[in-house]
Image (cartoon, helix red, strand yellow):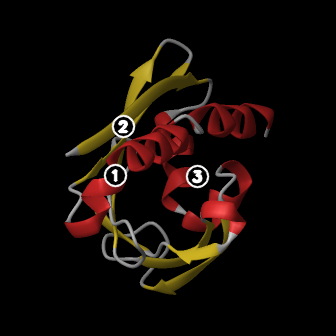
Amino acid sequence: MAHAENETTINRSPEDVYAFLADGLNNRAWRSGVQDITLKSGTPGDLGAVYSQTLSGPGGRPIVGDYEITAADPGKLLGFQVVAGPARPAGAYRLSEAPGGTTVRFTLDLEPKGLMKLVGPVIVRTMNAEVAQLTNLKNVLESA
């Protein structure tokens, strides 16, 4: 199993951080690999909502990375499952109150199958880069 996680504290309330994360249309503001994103079905941030997104793949070529919200506990937990694309990790944002703000823990897990097992180190590197973008989230939310 490939696993990546990162944590940061943001000087905003858990409700503010959750609301920003739950609306997938905000992904372009803090996730550098998101080229385009739209709400495909459901209500933004609600359980079962599906977002269609195009990501920058190897060499910058576009790849599909649609995801579905699988857990929605406002101010506490936002879970998702990638449902389209070459890699389909499950992820979660766990939020907890911290002095002056919110601690956010971002985790990604993927069970590589087939040929994907051969590129395991590349997958882990990509996942680590993705969770490291919490720094961008912090900067965006604290400057708003």
Q: Position of residue 97 (x, y in %)?
A: 41, 24
Examine the rendered structure and indicate whether residue 4 appears above or below residue 42.
above
Disc 3 crowd rating (10 Å Cα; few below 14, some 14-19, many 20+) is some
Q: Residue at x 49, y 47 (%)?
A: 126
Q: Return the mark for residue 4.
A: 2
What is the spatial separation of the Cα atoms under label 2 and label 3, in whole angstroms?
Answer: 22 Å
Give the residue type at disc 1.
Answer: Gly
Q: Earlier in the sequence, mark 2 or mark 3?
A: 2
Disc 1 crowd rating (10 Å Cα; few below 14, some 14-19, many 20+) is many
Give the residue type at disc 3.
Answer: Phe
What is the spatial separation of the Cα atoms under label 3 and label 1, in whole angstroms?
Answer: 16 Å
Q: Residue at x 68, y 48 (%)?
A: 30
SS under mark 2 = strand
Q: Earlier in the sequence, mark 1 or mark 2?
A: 2
Disc 2 crowd rating (10 Å Cα; few below 14, some 14-19, many 20+) is many
Circle 3 residue: 20
Taking depth in this image into account, of 25 and 115 the one nearest to the observer is: 115
Give the residue type at disc 2.
Answer: Ala
Horizontal side of 91 relative to 114 (left or right) equals: right
Q: Earlier in the sequence, mark 3 or mark 1?
A: 3
Q: In the displayed orientation, state which residue is furthest to the top.
A: 99
Q: Residue at x 56, y 75 (%)?
A: 63
Q: Residue at x 65, y 58 (%)?
A: 33
Circle 1/circle 2 CB separation < 8 Å: no
Examine the rendered structure and indicate whether residue 9 appears above or below residue 87.
above
Circle 1 residue: 91
Q: Locate the C terminus by quadrant.
A: top right
Q: Nearer the viewer, mark 1 or mark 2?
A: 2
Q: Nearer the viewer, mark 2 or mark 3?
A: 2
SS under mark 3 = helix
Horizontal side of 144 relative to 106 (left or right) equals: right
Q: In the displayed orientation, state which residue is furthest to the bottom.
A: 41
